[in-house]
Image (cartoon, grey):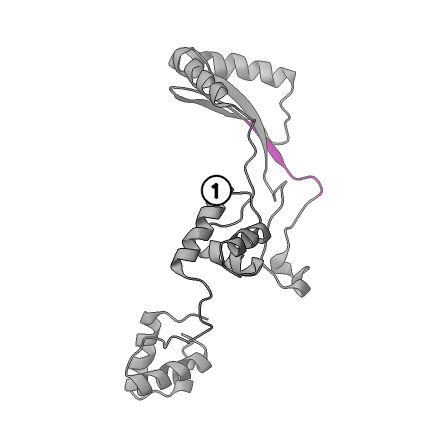
Amino acid sequence: MVISKETRGVIIALHKNGLTGKSIAARKIAPQSKIYCIIKNFKERGSIVAKKAPGRPRKTSKHQDRLLKVFQLRDRATSSAELAQEWQQAGVSASARTVRRAVLEQGLDSRRAAKKPLLSRKNIRDRLILCKRGKVIFSDESPFRLFGTSGKQLVRRRQVERYHQSRLMPTVKHPETIHVWGCFSAKGVGSLTVLPKNTAMNKKWYQNVLREQLLPTVPEQ
């Protein structure tokens, strides 16, 4: 548990006023063991700043860390094991675990890649020209669950905590769903329509939305 500098200052101030570690702990501002350590550190060093633990010496230099970042940015899909092999070829002996820790320190978290249609540079340029020069409105509808999520949810837990209440993702058999329709063009967004709960976007609803929402939006866009 990390104790803030402000809390450390409060603990030392109470200690100077004659309160014991046990009395300070009764105020529930920090665990009793931490309070004793903070007071001991103040007595020995005269400072409220935590003494840095020596820890294990770093295995890599700043230059080697920058080299690893170059490898990672060159191919964002490279695994930690593959990066470790590249690093080894550059003269750095490190495990995949060390690589993961190093790239995390550089702010390169491992995340799911967003999925988008494969487009060439020409496709992108032509579509952009069409949107800017032509009179184009894009519209679509999407369902949203009002309870839970339809995808995966990651949680950090120990192996034995799989069914711990606070580590679960609650589900229901038939979650309420709403369908939302919207549109946009190069000039901005258009109107937004929310269908009644548990109403699917069928032929009747779609025609009604196009007539009542899309057509009035066209002159504005």
Q: Position of residue 148 (x, y in %)?
A: 61, 44
Instruction: Please tell me which residue is depicted at 42% across the width and 86% down the height of the picture.
Output: 22
Q: Position of residue 26 (x, y in %)?
A: 43, 81
Query: Which quarter of the rendering shows the C terminus?
Result: top left
Can the viewer see residue 105 in this picture? yes
Decide: is 187 above or below 148.
above
Nearest the camera: 96 or 175?
96
The quarter of the displayed image where residue 9 is located: bottom left
Residue beneath disc 1 = 74
Q: Position of residue 7 (x, y in %)?
A: 35, 72
Q: Is residue 116 left or right of residue 41?
A: right
Decide: is 155 above or below 152.
below
Instruction: Please tell me which residue is depicted at 68% across the width and 65% down the height of the picture.
Output: 160
Is residue 174 found inside the magenta-colored segment of the image?
A: yes
Which secondary structure lies at badge 1? helix
Amino acid type at circle 1 is Arg
Magenta-tinted stretch: 173-180
Instruction: Please tell me which residue is depicted at 61% across the width and 61% down the height of the picture.
Output: 157
Instruction: Please tell me which residue is depicted at 47% across the width and 72% down the height of the picture.
Output: 56
Q: Is residue 141 left or right of residue 61?
A: right
